[in-house]
Amino acid sequence: MKANIAHLPRLRLTPAQFFELPEYSCTYPTGTTTGKRWRRLDGAHDHSFIRRGGKPQWMIGEYGEPTPDGKSVKLIWWRPVIIVPALTVPLPTYQDLDIMHRVAERVA
């Protein structure tokens, strides 16, 4: 992982949330509305980085609050962590497996 991304705070997202974010890997989105988020494949357009063996990494950008003078906004960067729900289906017991085995023998 790139050093500049490893230290970033983590942002937990589902796969759907991640892919719903617009991608801006070589620019910044227009309109600096506070809270606006996007995904960036950092390093994807840095050919010398890739030639040196670098691997692009995903980041999430977010526009923060405007500066006191109102001329710019804070950029907040996150390291995305994709979360998936755990399997909640109960596993079969040994008794269930035994019954399934006996049924399979009768069918065969």
Image (cartoon, rainbow, N blue to C red):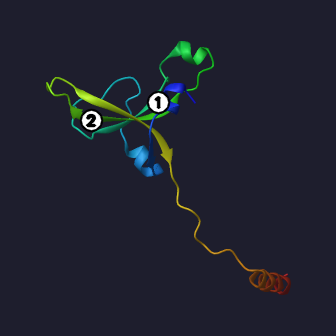
Quadrant in which the N terminus appears? top right
Which label lies toward us, 2 or 1?
A: 2
The amino acid on which the numbered mark 1 sits, given as a three-letter code, is Leu
Q: Earlier in the sequence, mark 2 or mark 1?
A: 1
Name the residue beneath numbered marker 1: 41
Q: Report the side of 54 relative to 65 (left or right).
A: right
Residue that numbered label 2 is attached to? 64
The quadrant holding residue 98 is: bottom right
Would you call the spot at circle 1 few (<14 residues within 10 Å), some (14-19), or many (20 or more)?
A: some
Residue at 78 percent across and 86 percent down: it is 99
Is residue 10 placed above or below 92 in the rendered structure? Answer: above
Residue 20 left/right relative to 43: left
Q: Secondary structure at mark 2?
A: strand
Q: Nearer the viewer, residue 3 or 63?
A: 3
On screen, residue 20 above or below 56: below
Residue 3 vertical position relative to residue 8 in the rendered view, above or below: above
- Residue 56 x/y as whole percent: 53, 27
Name the residue located 28 percent from the left edge and 39 percent from the top edge: 36
Image-quadrant location for residue 25: top left
Residue kind at label 2, given as amino acid type: Gly
Residue at screen point 49% across, 23% down: 43
The residues bearing labels 2 and 1 have C-alpha atoms spaced at a distance of: 20 Å
